[in-house]
Image (tube, rainbow, N blue to C red):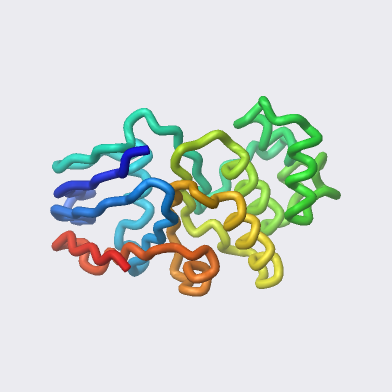
Amino acid sequence: MEKICVKDISKSFGNKTVFYHLNLTINSGEIRCIMAPSGAGKTTLLRILMGLEDIDSGSISGQKGKRFSAVFQEERLCEYMTAIENIRLVTPCLSVKTVWQELDRLGLKDCANQIVSELSGGMRRRVSILRALLAEYDILCLDEPFKGLDNTCKEQVLEYVKQRTTGKTVLFVTHDEEEVLQLGAKKIMLSDMDTGVCQLC
């Protein structure tokens, strides 16, 4: 799969400049972690790459026609559907048995048939992550996906994500250096949005 090339993109919201001539390259099959201060445009960059936000100028190549799957910062689950139904809503070809087995791997087997409005925040987060990972995709976007998970649960989910994304193209937003290390991600440091400086590590 061809790499994604972001060339000289600029993006503003009113008088606020988010990106100014930003350049970066994302190679196929890599996990790339996007890091920057809060409010610096990490989520906006993901939305642009997924085609959910327009750019003011510049160009992006390599992402058209690709299938995206995502975990957003906010939950986007159907409240009155069960955990299994939420996952199969996105990927109906998955059998109930397969979904149940994957829920079990993240400690969710006992709530597989509960409606998600009855689940705790951490449980809902794990359902969101599973829904994204079990979907058919070319590029996976994760926007602070482990937020709200306790340390024990986070370790379990991180290991699961690492196993499921081997050889996949993943764009991952976090403030946590430990998460970057555990996933073996390469960092994209958006250090100065106003001048479009992008440091690859």
Along the viewing direction, whichever of 175 and 138 lies nearer the viewer: 138
Tell me if 88 is positioned left or right of 58 in this view: right
Tell me if 158 is positioned left or right of 186 in this view: right
Tell me if 48 is positioned left or right of 111 in this view: left
Eyeballing the image, is 144 above or below 134? below
- Quarter location, residue 182: bottom right
**Which residue ends up furthest to the top in the rendered image?**
93
Percent coordinates x, y for residue 65 in the rendering:
37, 28
Percent coordinates x, y for residue 81 in the rendering:
72, 35
- Quarter location, residue 84: top right
* Quadrant containing the N terminus in the rendered view: top left
Residue at point 50%, 40% (across, down) = 69
Eyeballing the image, is 155 above or below 19? below
Residue at point 68%, 39% (across, down) = 79
* Quadrant containing the C terminus in the rendered view: bottom left
Percent coordinates x, y for residue 64 in the rendering:
32, 31
Along the viewing direction, whichever of 119 and 66 lies nearer the viewer: 66
Residue at point 74%, 39% (across, down) = 99
Tell me if 18 is positioned left or right of 166 in this view: left
**Which residue ends up furthest to the right in the rendered image?**
110
Residue at point 25%, 38% (across, down) = 61
| Numbered disc total | 0
